Image: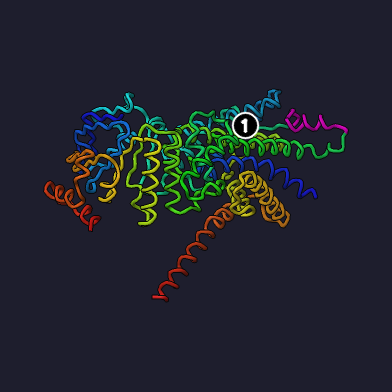
Amino acid sequence: MDLIITALELGLTSSITVLALFISYSMLNVCDLSTDGCFTLGAVVGAMIALSGHPYLSIPASMLAGSISGFITGLLQTKCGINSLLSGIVVNTGLYSINIAILGNKSLINLNNVNTVFSKMKTLLNGTVLESQYKLILVIAILSLLVFLISNLLKTRLGLAIRATGNNLDMVKSSSINPVFTTISGLCISNSLTALSGCLLAQMNKSANVNMGAGMVTVALASLLIGNVIFNKSRKTTLRIIGAVLGSFIFRLVYTIALRFKVPAFMLNLISSIIVILSLSIPFFINKRKNSNLKKKRKEQC
Amino acid sequence: MLKLKNVRKTFNKNSQDIQIALNDITLNVKKGDFVSIIGSNGAGKSSLFNAICGSFEIDEGSIILDNTNITFMPEHKRAKLIGRLFQDPLRGTAPEMSILENLYLACSSHDSWLHRITEKEKRFIKEKVAMLGMGLENRMNQAVGLLSGGQRQALTLAMAIIITPKILLLDEHTAALDPPTAEKIMNLTNKIVKENELTCLMITHNMNYAIDYGNRLLMMHEGQIILDLDENQKKETSASSIINEFKNIIASDRILTTLR
């Protein structure tokens, strides 16, 4: 039971990053490689602000930091003529230094005995039956709010324009929508979510370090792709969002079980790489196979 | 309505591949004109449209649309004034989005970013789609990617005119469709242009379309307009006489093949 709860807590917290990738990767069709650095950015900004005694402020502050990072990534790829993958990598590299600077030239910070959003939640639930699950409750509350907000946002004109930008750039331009605006605002939103996810994870684990985001983009992508399998090609955006969250939970669950069977913790990144490789290449090969079968048939008919 | 004055555009300047796309084009299109444009490949027809739409900035000259100088207006802003269809029927619509969502984006430029589609707008869009006469109004929530090329081109047409544009540009918009579908889309285009009294420029490689539709005919060659027939001259002309005219000026393979 504890195993599942831990998987839930971690899975749901990192699923906020999956939601971010849902916006940038699935909607905007941009593979945002600054995710790793942005996740850490949110963690360190949140941690420093919690450390200074403002746990509630840490959430908007980390989201703001994330959206600034997203703004820069977006600006580089729309206005500075830098390839979208490269601009993500460049921002990611730059963020590494910035994150260390924010931590005050340290690579690790401890949040033991510091008031965090989780410890506040614990005090709030003191004496009720829910007290022991304070982490889970807070994460679920935040997550359901986000799912509600994002699924509604994607139905607005801005959301539709962001989707169209990833779908057909020509159509966006001829609909008199500025694709620079939609790309940048999409990346701002997605990166603020990534940073929020990092902020929550740092406060949950009561520590933040400059390497905690390493490989996050692959882990989140793996979760996103697992979620895509669950709600295979559903047209309903809300279902796809929930699928992304579920994917993240399943991924963490499998991982936690693997840990139980003495798979070392450092294997996480390899596992997520393999999941991403398989879930992207298998559909490709299936398609190829179909085509070659068709070709064979046609040859036979000739 | 549309005035082009001494428009010039050269690609690959200062290199061996120098290519003069538009060579001193001056054109005056009146309100309500339906102009067909013919010419061989590389004659500058699409470049003319790109210049009007702002896909690139022109080197010299000016473009005035309905008394507004649009020479330096960015592309996405001009799109409010201009409707455009491309040869590729997939280019005008977003495949993963529904018919409703595609058309809404085309007519939403006055809405705030957080606006959601209202029932009233749904009805309005449905009416517009019903006008196409393809039964698509009953499939409003279907992804556009599942539709045929002809259906998608018809939707693009609906998107281009849902907010009445100052001018409609058709860039070989039936060329990628099979003949019966092309015929259908051409008739639909003609009907919509007439009903809405649109000003329209149409590039085509189909001589019969060029002669049957519209009230003015332009022929382009090497970045210049080499022939300009008004309504009366057009009535008296035939496909073969235009070809002869063209042969007299220059030989071109593609137009000849189209006629055959």
Image side of residue A202 versus residue B72, left or right: right
Image side of residue B189 versus residue A153, left or right: left
Residue A186: horizontal and vertical position, in percent?
Answer: 53, 35
- The local secondary structure at tag 1 comes to helix
Scheme by which the image is coloured? rainbow
- What span is colored magenta in the figure? A112-127
Q: Residue furthest left?
A: B248
Residue A32 appears in the rendering: no
Depth check: give the residue in front, B78 or B205.
B205
- Magenta-span inclusion, residue A116: yes
| Total tally of numbered discs in the picture | 1
Above or below — where is A246 with respect to A204? below
Q: Residues within 10 Å of mark 1 (few under 14, many from 20)?
A: many
Subunit of label 1: A
Q: Amino acid at mark 1?
A: Val
Above or below — where is B152 with respect to B27? below
- The residue tagged 1 is A44
Residue B166: horizontal and vertical position, in percent?
Answer: 37, 31
Within the image, what quadrant is residue A99 found in?
A: top right
